[in-house]
Image (tube, rainbow, N blue to C red):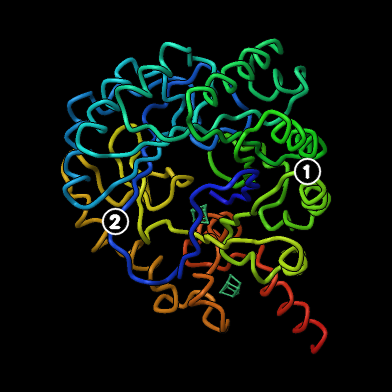
Amino acid sequence: MLDVKFKLTPSHTTERVWMEPSPLRTLFWNSTYACNFNCGVCFTNGGVPFTDELSTSEAMDTFKKAHDAGVRKIIISGGEPFMREDLIEILAYMGSIGLEARIASNGSLLTDDILRRLRDETLVKSFQISVDTIQPELYGEFHGVLPDRLASVLNIIESIKKHGFHTTVSSRLTPHTLPGIPDLMDRASMEGWATFTVHFPLHTGRSNYAFDQDTDFISLLRPAFDHFLALPKQWVIEMFIPWARYHPVVRHLEKRIRVVHAGCRAGRDRVTINPCGDISFCVCFDLPEFYLGNVRQDNLEDIFKDSKTCDMMRHPEKYGICADCANVQTCGGGCRVAAYSITGRLDGQDESCPVYKLQVKDEKKGA
Ligand code: SF4
Ligand code: SF4
């Protein structure tokens, strides 16, 4: 994901040395393609489940092996994860072997009873609920549901908070959601939601491609950054964007608030398993031609250690990525999904990078 997280309350935050070698520690699991919403910007094309999705026992076996390999955290998304009837059973099993879970959901299928069971029977730590906008009509249009669904989702967020889970509300950046981001921040501040996340759009899945992939999203968010800084309580901004620290708006922000650069960890300490068991390096990149293997027949740890794509993520310089840039060891060579969307090559240039843009501008001036 390309995310900016606005944290309103203190929580676990770590600054990382991005390119340092790391064992496999985290798994993303897109648990099903089934979804009861029909969001125009779904990055996994959620809707109807595939017939060959992992069974309960296959999922449990995968997580047992992952735990044996050192994985300690699973981030679960979909589709809508709670469309899986066995999800609580799987989460309880994960908890019994010491695996923590974080769940990204549309929130519509959660109930107080489910939340109580998750608190008592599992190691679920947090929820990320997609809200995108607090205007009911736009919410309905955006998610393909009736506008009054927003009120029930906001109620369930309140329950999530009351049950003691970390509460994140997320919005995907589109021309329609951009103007409403300050209102969502106000709501987060008022309701005590711990984190508000903005996802930058990537040209994958059912994106509406409303922005070019090399759009300067950070400059678009400048008014939102200013709004965040004016809130009565704000704690930290986390950037999950490889080159963010070189952006002038971010440099300016760093004079006013603590900014944590978490970069991209895809293929570096984590991989993604899709509903059918296929392994990808990045949660946003569910393309058959780039699958690294399948948990039904391949060893997850071997794939992580030996696949060329994960090696490229850990050593971009070996593959000629950003070969002329002195920042490559810190940045990691930009977002590979953005690079692929723009250039058609996984080892291409992430042309949304401000350092690259400046270099191109200077070359044009010099020509
Ligand atoms: S390649 Fe990295 S930065 Fe790009 S979408 Fe995937 S996780 Fe995010
Ligand atoms: S040119 Fe490449 S390595 Fe340099 S900052 Fe940009 S994306 Fe990162």
In the rendered image, which residue does mark 1 sit on? 232
Residue at the image point whose x is 64% and y is 54% from the top? 236
Left or right of 122, for residue 109: right
First in residue order: circle 2 vs circle 1: 2
Task: Find out if the beta carbon at label 2 lies less than 8 Å from the nearest ligand 1 atom.
Answer: no
In the rendered image, which residue does mark 2 sit on? 24
Q: Position of residue 187 (x, y in %)?
A: 74, 30
Left or right of 15, for residue 24: left
Instruction: Reply above or below: 19 against 60.
Output: below
- All told, the count of numbered labels is 2
Which quadrant is the C terminus positioned in?
Answer: bottom right
Name the amino acid type tagged 2.
Leu
Residue at the image point whose x is 18% and y is 47% from the top? 298
Q: Position of residue 243 (x, y in %)?
A: 61, 67
Name the amino acid type tagged 1.
Pro
Q: Position of residue 108 (x, y in %)?
A: 54, 16
Residue at the image point whose x is 56% and y is 56% from the top? 240
> Do we see residue 59 in this rendering?
no
Considering depth in this image, is 138 or 280 the residue closer to the camera? Answer: 138
